Image (cartoon, rainbow, N blue to C red):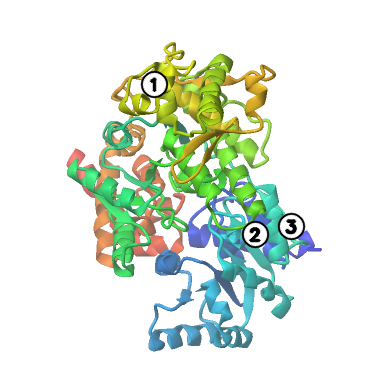
Amino acid sequence: MVSPTDVRTEDAGQVLRRVFGYDAFRGSQQQVVDHVVAGGDALVLMPTGGGKSLCYQIPALVRDGVAVVISPLIALMQDQVDALTAVGVRAGFLNSTQDLAERRRVEGAFLAGELDLLYLAPEGLAVRSTLQLLERGTIALFAIDEAHCVSQWGHDFRPDYLNLSMLHERWPGVPRIALTATATSATRTEIATRLQLTDARHFVASFDRPNIQYRIVPKREPRKQLLALLRDEHPGDAGIIYCLSRASVEKTAEFLVQNGVPALPYHAGLDAATRAANQQRFLREDGLVMVATIAFGMGIDKPDVRFVAHLDLPKSVEGYYQETGRAGRDGLPSTAWLAYGLQDVVQQRKMIETSEGDLAHRRNLAAHLDAMLALCETVRCRRVQLLEYFGETGSAACGNCDTCLSPPESWDGTVAAQKLLSTVFRLDRERNQRFGAGHCIDILLGKQTDKISQYGHDSLTVFGIGNELREAEWRGVVRQLLAEGLLAVEGDYGTLALTEASAEVLGRRRTVTMRREPERPASSRSAKPRGAATVVAALDPAATSVFERLRAWRAATAKEQGVPAYVIFHDATLRQIATDAPATLAELSRINGVGENKLAKYGEQILTVLAEDAAASA
């Protein structure tokens, strides 16, 4: 056990203030830091933007030796090192992108004790020369970032993470801290087992991100719906849009550019140079939108992403939570928006049915999808349901998600379900035929289509018995029956089939309660902007002028140094500077986010900007 008396608490607090410019730890950060500084192992779950990095960066600066950080994000290691260098921390990385001379320079710095943190990819630990290098140095701790990558049931599984248990075997006296933003209790157990952290202390912060507004809308014309969201609520904001396929990524990015929204594509089909260039532009430029598959985003440290949009249904709540968590890392108002429709359910069910792996694997995929569908179809507060999925119970309705702001109605859909299931039954049993949702709905609505005439389906007893609902409402019925497992999708063409549970509804032994979407206007022009406009609107007119001058100075400084703007200062820090208007370096040093190194580097420049603004306003 780790004795609290062994922890150098004052040292940790001093480092926090001197290096990073913060007066106090947040949430459980203090407990984690104290535990690791004292030599204890830890498994840390904190939401994206919750300050996980400080949980190993502070101990790295307090303990003797170099902290070795295992990160799967080779493309982002340079940015991570730049951010640490900006606050005066000695950091480096070793990965396959470096030439021999650069690698030897970093290795020499490590052996000479001239580094505080060294970043490695998990693949690097499979190289014998890397292990030999680490054995020759003094290691303060091992930090395993994005630890959920060790979970074989997870959405970001990386086989090389399975080998990280050897850290405990080769360096039994070195503390290890594994960190992730996304893990259910089952995933936490798997992480602890696979990394030999079963005796580690677990620190689980709240999964709540109150600054994010969760919204799930019926999918009609998704790209037009997306464009309305960006124009009405997030003009000029940085954001991420997730699509399921590479083709959809390309078409969506092209659509946005044609409509005046600066957007870039990112997917595994692009060559490495293009992916790297697009990622760097997104990190370094203001107001860019990245349209991507899930290949993009893990480890992205851009704090001012104001929205994350999904044009296709995520495969799991874990994936959805992690992706939406990339919005609003700075704590300012942000949006998580998802367009969801019947075809999403059909497509995901079909992908599971045809996926590789054994029955247990397919069942696990189906369970993940069921939880995601339940979140989409709920009439309860989305945030409450999301938190309950991660084991956080007892939360009150948030008042800020779509189901709180525009509560949907629930209705008794038993009769509608029986009609739809009867249509599938009669096609299958009476005609030995199976069709997709669209054809079944046409039968219920009594449409005389060419296909219905060809197959003689206008003679079925269910033909035309569903005119009490519109086509869109019937698609909602099919979607919700699929979500509840009362209907199945089979074959390459996504045809509908009954399940064992269907008989309970057809036999009147089970009622079916369904969600009816509240009527929404076609345009969301009445919606309040939630992005940069909100950030500025929260300031008084005088502070707004200063804030914009500071942003312009930051942009020019970041461009000159070739680093992302947030490496200089976050928006939240600039907002406080604009509001407090410090007149001296001593006053500036008391602003959150202004540490010793940044004060020395940028302090006089900031005071000059403030003085120029005051003179212009006089």
Q: Secondary structure at mark 3?
A: strand
Measuring 21% from the left and 48% from the top, which residue is drawn there? 612
Q: Which residue is mark 2?
A: 33
Question: According to the image, label 3 marks what residue?
Answer: 201
- The front one of 140 and 224 is 224
Crowding near the residue tagged with mark 1, few <14, some 14–19, many ≥20 C-alpha atoms within 10 Å: some
Q: Which residue ends up furthest to the top in the rendered image?
A: 468
Q: Position of residue 492 (x, y in %)?
A: 46, 46
In the rendered structure, which disc, 2 or 1, sits on the residue that comes first in sequence? 2
Q: Is residue 385 above or below residue 198?
A: above
Judge by depth and name the residue closer to the eye, 415 or 520: 415
- Locate residue 288 relative to residue 28 in the image: left or right: left
Instruction: Estimate how packed mark 3 is, as few (under 14), some (14 to 19) or many (20 or more) residues with alpha carbons within 10 Å.
Output: some
Q: Earlier in the sequence, mark 3 or mark 1?
A: 3
Residue tagged 1: 471
Q: Is residue 332 above or below residue 409?
A: below
Position in image of residue 380 (x %, y %): 57, 25
Question: Callout 2: 10 Å neighbours few (<14), some, many (20+)?
Answer: many
- Side of 383 relative to 583 (left or right): right
Q: Earlier in the sequence, mark 3 or mark 2?
A: 2
Q: Disc 3 and disc 2: Cα gap in Å?
A: 12 Å
Q: Are marks 3 and 2 in contact (CB under 8 Å)?
A: no
Between marks 3 and 2 in the image, the one whose residue lies nearer the viewer? 3
Percent across and percent down for residue 453 are: 34, 24
Q: Amino acid at mark 1?
A: Glu
